[in-house]
């Protein structure tokens, strides 16, 4: 079964001391995808054909630039720009007349760039693998009691990945497995969201002069953990 291939990274993520194991998995895949793209693969014809077509989203373009491989990025950027020029030239040459200008839908050039902005070689690569990781979570939940215990003891999930688990479990699990998964996931999410919420509250209370000498407890990094819970964004200190 394909899910068995991904049990190690999934278990590793749930073994880590984190506020969302799925964010850990997603971040690892993102780093791998950036390294792959900026490695020797940029000279591979199949990879270049794909990057020419999709390009990169703004966030991943910045990450690619930060890797420092100026030649590799320049080569991919050049051939991608050539593809854009070719595509736009074709769209510009399409005849338009009078009232029929946009009668069949949006302006084709605006639609082209809208679709291009939403496409990204890095995002596509991450999403393909991440989907397999999520399926592996359900596979392990069905097959491995040790993983079920680990899942129930984790520090919860960010909003987005909690919603993803609740949605995907409907088709990935059935019967008692699904009922138990929903019950456990709901509890893990709320218990840990409340925990971080309490930490954020104490963080703000510490600004009251009456609490100046009180201990910080677990609230020093509460904002960072709160951002991860709410937005799935890891802030580096």
Image (spheres, rainbow, N blue to C red):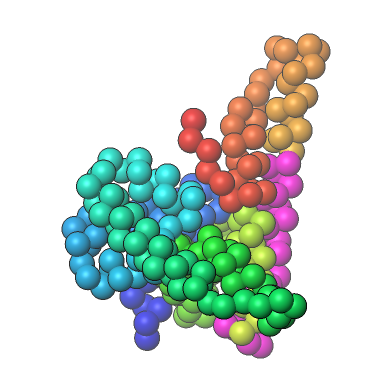
**Which region shows up in magenta?**
172-197
Q: Is 2 situated left or right of 74 in this image?
A: right
In the rendered image, the quadrant that contains the N terminus is: bottom left
Above or below — where is 164 with respect to 16?
below
Above or below — where is 90 with respect to 229?
below
Report x, y in % for residue 210. Answer: 81, 13
Of residues 101 and 119, which is closer to you in this image?
Answer: 101
Report x, y in % for residue 58. Answer: 49, 50
Report x, y in % for residue 82. Answer: 34, 62
Of residues 107 and 118, which is closer to you in this image?
Answer: 107
- As for residue 112 lying within the magenta part, the answer is no
**The image quarter in which residue 89 lies:** bottom left
The residue drawn where x is 69% and y is 35% is: 199
The residue drawn where x is 61% and y is 56% is: 157
Q: Is 4 situated left or right of 42 in this image?
A: right
- As for residue 179 lying within the magenta part, the answer is yes
Report x, y in % for residue 218. Answer: 62, 32
């Amino acid at each position: 079964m394909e899910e068995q291939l991904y049990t190690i990274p999934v278990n590793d993520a749930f073994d880590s001391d984190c506020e969302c194991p799925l964010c850990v998995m997603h971040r690892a895949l993102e780093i791998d995808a950036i390294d792959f793209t900026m490695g020797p693969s940029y000279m591979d014809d199949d990879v270049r054909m794909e990057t020419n077509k999709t390009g990169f989203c703004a966030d991943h373009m910045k990450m690619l630039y930060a890797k420092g491989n100026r030649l590799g990025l320049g080569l991919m950027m050049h051939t991608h720009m050539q593809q854009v020029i070719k595509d736009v030239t074709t769209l510009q040459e399409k005849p338009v007349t009078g009232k029929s200008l946009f009668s069949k839908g949006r302006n084709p050039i605006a639609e082209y760039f809208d679709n291009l902005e939403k496409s990204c070689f890095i995002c596509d690569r991450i999403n393909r693998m991440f989907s397999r990781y999520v399926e592996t979570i359900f596979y392990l939940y069905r097959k491995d009691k040790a993983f079920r215990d680990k899942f129930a003891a984790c520090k919860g999930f960010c909003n987005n990945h909690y919603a993803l688990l609740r949605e995907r479990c409907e088709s990935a699990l059935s019967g008692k497995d699904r009922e138990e998964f929903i019950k456990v996931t709901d509890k893990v999410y709320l218990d840990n969201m409340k925990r971080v919420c309490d930490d954020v509250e104490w963080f703000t209370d510490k600004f009251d002069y009456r609490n100046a000498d009180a201990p910080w407890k677990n609230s020093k990094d509460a904002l960072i953990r709160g951002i991860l819970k709410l937005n799935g964004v890891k802030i580096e200190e």
